[in-house]
Image (spheres, rainbow, N blue to C red):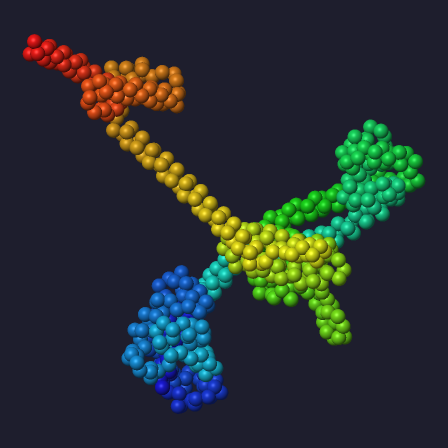
């Protein structure tokens, strides 16, 4: 059976025919030894056809398709043109060797060409790759290297920036930085407390919060200068006027030592650094909350932004977390305890990072393991929805949170929870209704914009149809200017509409009355402009009617 080789290079597709395999042998070792020698390998493999890519973008598209295991229309046409045709109902007398098994299965499904991908084929393709520039004329090695380098850069760039808004690397870095800031702020605050306590030791017992302590230390500076005039400023910082008075009284009877001005300056600068770090930590937390609502809204609404970010960072990415089963997610973060328990044959841990959620803390001691297992199950569902769903919504996370709450009530009070199928049906219906509403709003906005554009076009046509002032005679232009009133255009339009409506109502009543008297059918409504144009004609017709009536009266007599 003949063997053909499909080789995908950065410059194009190429097809080789391996016809002299008897010279080097059929096993993999023989091919591996003969690959380095071009004179020997050139007798085995022969170039059948070469199809270059039209552009760098075409090469990138073909490379993406090959990496996903898909066969493009260009590759199909290339194979059908250059491979022997297979008759219907008969087996092919050749096979096609490919590097990617997924591409081979796709080729066989579409074109019924038998494909194979094994070590023997891979060794032959390795030899083709090594001597590729020798098989194709007018192809320099430098040109091939440039094509490979450019394609490699564009392929990697496209893989990295697939979706800017859904990149979870920012969440991983933010949660790492948040943990580091917590440790640093804690250690720096303890240093500020210890340093400033030499000067004002009573302040530690009055204020417990580290951030507030640093702000008060910066505000007070020298305790001997503190007086009752500083109470409003201290009350603004502390939030309690009684505490502010207590600080002033404690400063008057303080046992601390006096510090030199330069020492106080250093303490104030260090306290300012701690304040800045604390404020930056708040901003970073807000940034983390917004990113989690963009990347994993369901997981964030179920278990919280910080715990969800810790799970994503520990798993490596949101896709890795979505691939984890619920049993793995349950003990994520407690790997040391797990392997220690397996080694000593003790009890395995019940929870890992999900212990920091509020649900496990609210459960009783004997139900902590059960609620941890149930919570990990819901977290795995939420992470999979966030990873693979195209609609960015937090409805599923809210419904899953309700289910966990119901499960807690079931463990404590025995209230039967709803079934998962019913809850998910309600969530899916609400999501579909939201999507349909958004689509309707988008259509309405599009129709409004189309109407506005049509009005603008009609106005432009009317303006174009009217002669400009320069083209008109001077008398007409002067009359136009004289008729312009100081009222705005909107008011004029409203007045015209009201007058037209009133005239139409009066005309309809008059026509109806005349029709009832004369027995004639109702006439159509006429606009005000028509009335103005037809005024002279109506006077003439009234005179004719009077003459006809006189003639009829004479005939009757």
x then y, percent, for residue 14: 37, 74
* Residue 231 position (above or below residue 345): above
x then y, percent, for residue 16: 37, 78
x then y, percent, for residue 71: 39, 69
Pick whichever, 219 or 205, lies toward us.
205
* Residue 95 position (above or below residue 519): below
x then y, percent, for residue 79: 34, 73
330 left or right of 225? left
User: Which quadrant holds the C terminus?
Assistant: top left
Image quadrant of residue 328? bottom right
Pick whichever, 407 or 177, lies toward us.
407
User: Which quadrant holds the N terminus?
Assistant: bottom left
Pick whichever, 347 or 249, lies toward us.
347
Total marks in image? 0
Q: Residue at x 40, y 60 (%)?
A: 57
State the residue lying farthest toward the front: 557
């Amino acid at each position: 059976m003949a063997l053909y080789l499909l080789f995908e290079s950065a410059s194009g597709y190429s097809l080789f025919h391996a016809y002299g395999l008897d010279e080097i042998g059929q096993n993999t070792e023989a091919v591996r030894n003969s690959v380095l020698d071009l004179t020997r390998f050139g007798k085995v493999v022969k170039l059948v056809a070469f199809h270059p890519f039209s552009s760098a973008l075409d090469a990138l598209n073909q490379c993406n398709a090959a990496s996903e295991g898909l066969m493009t229309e260009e590759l199909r046409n290339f194979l059908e043109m250059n491979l022997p045709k297979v008759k219907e109902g008969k087996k092919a007398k050749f096979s096609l060797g490919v590097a990617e098994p997924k591409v081979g299965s796709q080729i066989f499904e579409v074109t019924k060409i038998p494909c194979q991908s094994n070590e023997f084929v891979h060794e032959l393709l390795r030899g083709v790759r090594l001597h590729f520039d020798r098989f194709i004329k007018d192809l320099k090695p430098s040109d091939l290297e440039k094509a490979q380098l450019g394609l490699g850069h564009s392929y990697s760039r496209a893989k990295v920036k697939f979706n800017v808004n859904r990149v979870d690397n920012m969440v991983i870095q933010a949660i790492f930085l948040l943990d580091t800031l917590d440790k640093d702020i804690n250690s720096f605050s303890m240093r500020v407390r210890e340093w400033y306590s030499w000067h004002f030791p009573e302040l530690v017992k009055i204020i417990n919060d580290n951030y507030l302590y640093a702000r008060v230390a910066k505000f007070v500076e020298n305790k001997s200068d503190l007086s009752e005039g500083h109470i409003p400023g201290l009350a603004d910082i502390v939030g309690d006027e009684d505490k502010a008075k207590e600080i002033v009284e404690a400063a008057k009877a303080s046992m601390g030592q006096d510090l030199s001005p330069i020492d106080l300056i250093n303490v104030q600068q260090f306290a300012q650094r701690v304040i800045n770090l604390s404020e930056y930590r708040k901003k970073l937390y807000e940034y983390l909350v917004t990113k989690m609502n963009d990347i994993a809204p369901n997981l964030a609404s179920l278990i919280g932004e910080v715990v969800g970010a810790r799970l994503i960072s520990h798993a490596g990415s949101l896709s890795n977390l979505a691939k984890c089963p619920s049993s793995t997610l349950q003990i994520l973060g407690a790997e040391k305890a797990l392997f220690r328990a397996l080694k000593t044959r003790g009890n395995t841990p019940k929870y890992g990072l999900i212990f920091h959620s509020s649900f496990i803390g609210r459960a009783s001691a004997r139900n902590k393991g059960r609620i941890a297992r149930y919570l990990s199950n819901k977290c795995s569902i939420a992470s999979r929805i966030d990873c693979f769903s195209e609609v960015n919504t937090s409805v599923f996370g809210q419904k899953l949170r309700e289910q966990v709450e119901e499960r807690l009530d079931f463990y404590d009070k025995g209230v039967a929870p709803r079934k998962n199928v019913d809850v998910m049906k309600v969530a899916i219906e609400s999501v579909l209704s939201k999507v349909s509403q958004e689509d309707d709003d988008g259509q309405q906005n599009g129709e409004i914009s189309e109407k506005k554009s049509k009005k603008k076009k009609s106005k432009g046509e009317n303006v174009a149809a009217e002669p400009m002032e320069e083209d008109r005679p001077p008398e007409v232009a002067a009359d136009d200017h004289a008729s312009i009133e100081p009222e705005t255009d909107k008011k004029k339009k409203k007045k015209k509409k009201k007058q037209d409506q009133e005239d139409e109502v009066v005309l309809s009543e008059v026509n109806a009355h005349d029709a009832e008297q004369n027995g004639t059918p109702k006439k159509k409504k006429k606009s005000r402009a028509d009335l103005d144009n037809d005024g002279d004609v109506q006077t003439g017709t009234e005179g004719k009617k009077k003459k006809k009536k006189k003639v009829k009266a004479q005939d009757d007599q």
